[in-house]
Amino acid sequence: MSNSIILAPINHFSAHPDEEEILIDIGAVFKILFIIYAYTNVSLLWEDLLRQMGQYDKVLEYFTKLLKIFNETENNYLEIHLYLGDIYLEKGDYDEVYKYHFYVYEALIKMDSPRFSYRSVNGLCTVLRFRCLYDKVIEYLICYMKYLDKINSRKCCAYATCLTNMENCYYGLSKYDDALNSYEKAQNLLKSYYSTDHFEIGRSLDNIDNVYRA
């Protein structure tokens, strides 16, 4: 058992998720489609530790120095911009959030690499929503969903999240028919990923209920 690895978390499917279980299906075969590492560089792990400690200024200083080390063509270079945007979001400096996340968004939208792209879109949209620029948020989301279509990721969770964020914008603009249409599309996508008692399904139903109440 010491050599075992977690391929996917399944405790949320259990009737007793807090209990340790060993599930055995004799003859089961799994195919690993791809592997995504949480950290591609030990330097990013150090950043995460500082961030969890609330040492935001040290993280900013640390990453600013790292930007001078990494080459612009490396994934780490884009990751650093993404993390800098996240830190500034926690500090409430929205101009800096927009600057760093837009840099990542502009670079990744030209690639076939969806790994960081939605985080950059989410950062941009968060800033714009705070400023009530809903039309601009919708513009970014539509552009990103076209990107997902291009790389054949239309059915991924990021697509459903885009629809949900778009719904929220339509709701904020009092365009309830458009909001309801997007909510229902997101709901259908989420059902293909989650069980009916999953909190994402519940949240989606609550959003639909809010539209009918408006």
Image: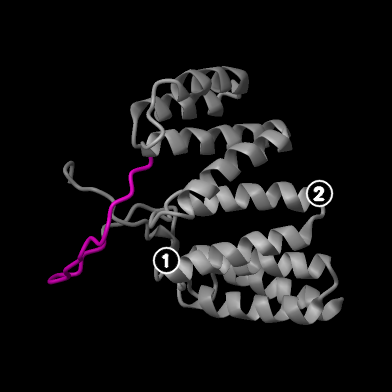
Image height of 142 relative to 214, above or below: above
Residue 144 image offset from top left, x and y in percent: 55, 62
Around disc 2, counting alpha carbons within 10 Å, would you say few (fewer than 14), some (14 to 19), or many (20 or more)? few
Asked if the stretch drawn in magenta spans residue 24, the answer is yes
Does 147 lie within the magenta span? no
Q: Earlier in the sequence, mark 1 or mark 2?
A: 1
Q: Residue at x 67, y 63 (%)?
A: 139
Tell me which secondary structure the magenta stretch mostly adopts: loop
In the image, the segment drawn in magenta is 23-39
Q: Nearer the viewer, residue 26 or 116?
A: 116
Question: Alpha carbon of mark 1 to alpha carbon of mark 2: how far?
Answer: 39 Å
**Numbered label attached to residue 13:** 1
Foreground residue, 156 or 125? 125
In the foreground, 208 or 118: 118
Q: Secondary structure at mark 1?
A: helix
Specify the quadrant that holds the C terminus: bottom right
Which x, y percent locates residue 111?
A: 41, 54
What is the x, y in percent for residue 87? 61, 32
Amino acid at dot 2: Arg
Residue 131 is tagged as: 2
Residue drawn at (59%, 72%), measured in percent from left and top?
A: 201
Residue placed at 61% from the left, 52% from the top? 122
Drawn side of residue 56 relative to residue 93, left or right: left
